[in-house]
Every structure is written in C-alpha cells, then in structure tokens.
Image (tube, grey):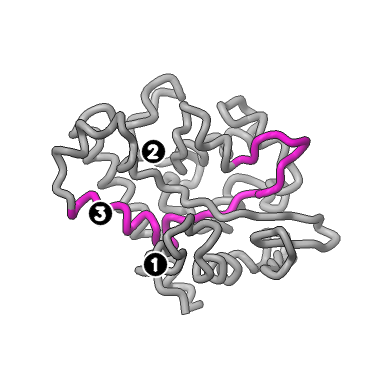
Amino acid sequence: MIDTTFDFRNDASGKDPDKYSPTLRRYHRALWSKPLPNGRVFDLDDSTQGAYLHHKSDLGEFVLASDSCIPTFTTWVTMRHILEQIPAEEVLAFRRAAYTIGGMMVFPGNKVDGRQTLNGARGFTRKIADRLDLTLECIRRYYLDEPSPLAAVLARYEDFFELFEDFTGYVDFFLLQDLVSADGSGVRFLMRFDDFSGRSVPGALDEYVAYRSATLEFIEARNRRIAALGL
C-alpha cells in the first residue's frame, strides 16, 4: 500500500532518496507500471543491474531514474535572507512534503552521447531551477514542436515521449492534472511566469510564501490522486 505521507529520507540512510530509498523505488515501480495511452503495458523492472527502473520490449528500451522534482530552495545560500524570516517548523514541513510521493517523478536516466540527462538539465538550467511546473511547460512545448530552454535535451529522449502520444497523455500518465489548466491545454505555474524571461526563483518573502503555498497545494492534490488508486 502506498503511504502518501511517507518521507523517503527516512529509509535512505542519510543519502539521496532518489537513489537509496527502497520504498521510493517500490512506489515508482507500482505507480508507473501500467497501460500507456496506446493500451500497451509499460512494465518496469527494478532488478536490472545498473538501472533504477528498466523497461525492454518491442516498444523500446528505457532506463528511468527518480527525481525529487519539487525544489523548496531551503538549502540555497542566496535564499537565506528569506528563509530566516520563516519559522523553522514551516521550513521543515515544506521539505517533508516535497519528499512524499506527490513530489517525485521519473525521467529518462540514460545519457545520450554522454550529454546531460533531463534531470541534470533541469537542475543546471537557471531558467528552470529544477521546478516541475517549468519543466512541464517545456514538455508541453515539446509536443507542439515549440522552442523552450529544455528543447535540446527533450529531443534526445524522443522515443520516451512518444510513448505518451501527446501532452495530455503525458500529464494523465504521471498524474500531473493538478499542474495544468482545467482544459488541460496549459500549465498552472507556481510563480508568475514571463515566458522564461523572468525569475525562476522567489526573490522576496511574499513571493516565496506564495510559491510554497501553491506548491504544497499541488503536492497534496497529487498525493490524493495517488492514494485514490488504492495501490
């Protein structure tokens, strides 16, 4: 049974939960081993040496890696002046929520031609700053063949994104409906969005508090979706 309140740091032995939490890997396998939009089952295996999760069939071969996809910015030195104004228990609560299954994703984990993975590019691209909403906007644009800060890395994983057929298929498969508009055509941004020309990180206390509130709302909504599956 998936416990949507479980903090994956608790069984990671002080290491990165994305790599070392056995509970997180088990949850990912249970959640994403399911039918694709075309009806084929995307079975994932967690016993392939050197792979976090692995799929191989006539659909193709895919290696997936876990990603804690919700940045709280609580360890950023440049955010210290903001975080010092927030009660410590609220900071800790935000981090706990971000390490529940509602704050986790899987992305292709294999390097193509030795270049950055999607997970790596999300973190190192300042216009994204590891944010899931901005990543999802790039994926939306990918399916429309539109440019974005992650266009090049997304194109490297064309075979993976083809599995979901279109943006709606991707959103529905990974239970991201609460991060898109009611008609499913646009992303609900967690901060003001200026077409990747504005800040990707909160710059003031009120902006951070609003970002945290919107992010927690999304995590809680996605956790409810996951819990409703009864896995």
Residue 132 to residue 60: above or below: above
Query: Which circle's residue, 2 or 1, is located before the other in the chain?
Result: 1
Give the image quarter of residue 142. Answer: top right
**Residue beneath disc 2:** 189
Marking on residue 171 = none
* Residue 230, placed above or below residue 61: below
Gap in angstroms between the C-alphas marked 3 and 1: 14 Å
Tell which of 180 and 18 is nearer to you: 18
Kindly report the distance in space between the C-alpha atoms of the residues bearing marks 2 and 1.
Answer: 30 Å
Q: Is residue 100 magenta?
A: yes
Question: Who comes first in sequence, dot 2 or dot 3?
Answer: 3
Which one is nearer the viewer's eye here, 80 or 35? 80
Q: Position of residue 190 (x, y in %)?
A: 35, 40
- Amino acid type at circle 2 is Phe
Label 2: which secondary element: loop
Q: Mark 1: which amino acid?
A: Asn
Front of the two marks 2 and 3 = 3
In the foreground, 158 or 103: 103
**Left or right of residue 77, residue 64 in this image:** right
Q: Residue at x 57, y 27 (%)?
A: 148
Mark 3 residue type:
Leu
Residue named by callout 1: 10
Disc 2/disc 3 C-alpha distance (Å): 23 Å
As helix, strand or loop, the secondary structure at mark 3 comes to helix
Q: Nearer the viewer, residue 111 or 198?
A: 111
Residue at 76% of width from left, 46% of height from top? 159
Span shown in magenta: 89-118
Q: Which mark is residue 92?
A: 3
Asked whether, in this view, residue 82 is left or right of residue 68, the answer is left
Locate residue 165 relative to residue 196 in the image: left or right: right
